[in-house]
Image (tube, rainbow, N blue to C red):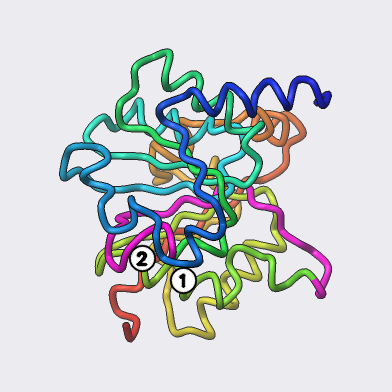
Amino acid sequence: MGSKNKLKRFQENETLPNVIQPTRESLVKGSFVHKGHWKDYFANDNPIIVELGCGKGEYTVALARQNPDCNYIGIDIKGARFWRGAKTAHEDQLSNVAFIRTQIELIEQVFAHDEVSEIWLTFPDPQLKFKRTKHRLTNPDFLLKYQRILNSKGVVHLKTDSAFLHGYTLGVLDGMGIRPQMAHHDVYKYVHAPAEVISIQTFYEQQYLAQQTPITYLKFSYEKYLR
């Protein structure tokens, strides 16, 4: 993407009412106004569902279309990417969608304890090198952050083309004493696969499938885990 296109998208994000771009300072200082008040932002009591590393926002928007009685928030540090999803949601008048530009490690400064019902991790970077372990979105530190913002029955979904990340996450969950509610190494061959998992395909996912790359899926909660 050229620098001119990026600049144009950054500028347009400033005008989109469904895009929120807090400063890192406001998050770190705890002055982010929407933390603990997302139901006020959406003007309803519907469940809050978050996609982390949302990229172009395709999954966030598609889920919002399928489930108008839920509120969806896509989070990514690259605003030029989620510009497309935010613009589409605005043009199509989807009032249950928002996007936040921030680092995922600051998620506890964005949401209050028990404020989120579901978290989606769709095709995150597997960070294959050992020295990048701390950046994997399913490492123990991140999983504990998710636990603290999810409500007692909240769930996490991981959908990825990386067999490595799938296996790594299973190992981390086992070490934490968490048994997945669902785990499959090739979800499109699973007859009981949830509709929301196989009915939505991002641009890159379609490419993976065309190359016959298996798409893995994990779903787990912390309900029986010591909170």
x then y, percent, for residue 89: 43, 22
Quadrant position of residue 202:
top right
Quadrant position of residue 210:
top right
Alpha carbons under labels 1 and 2: distance apart: 7 Å
Residue in view at x 48 percent, y 19 percent: 88
Q: Is residue 157 magenta?
A: no
Taking depth in this image into account, of 35 and 60 the one nearest to the observer is 35
Residue in view at x 30 percent, y 39 percent: 71
Asked if the residue under mark 2 is in contact with the one under mark 1, i.e. CB atoms within 8 Å, the reply is yes
Residue in view at x 65 percent, y 24 percent: 9
Kind of residue indicated by mark 2: Ile
Which residue appears farthest toward the left when viewing the image? Answer: 45
Helix, strand or loop at mark 2: helix
Residue in view at x 42 percent, y 75 percent: 179
Magenta stretch in the rendered image: 109-131
x then y, percent, for residue 182: 42, 60
Helix, strand or loop at mark 1: helix
Residue 145, numbered label: 1
Residue 74, numbered label: none
Residue 149, numbered label: 2
Kind of residue indicated by mark 1: Lys
x then y, percent, for residue 98: 41, 36
**As drawn, 123 above or below 205:** below
Q: Is residue 114 magenta?
A: yes
Q: Is residue 192 left or right of residue 81?
A: left
Quadrant position of residue 170:
bottom right
Dot 1 alpha-carbon crowd within 10 angstroms: few under 14, some 14 to 19, many 20 or more: some
Which residue appears farthest toward the top when viewing the image? Answer: 91
Taking depth in this image into account, of 212 and 79 the one nearest to the observer is 79
Q: Is residue 168 left or right of residue 220?
A: right
x then y, percent, for residue 224: 29, 79
In the picture, the quarter occupied by the N terminus is top right
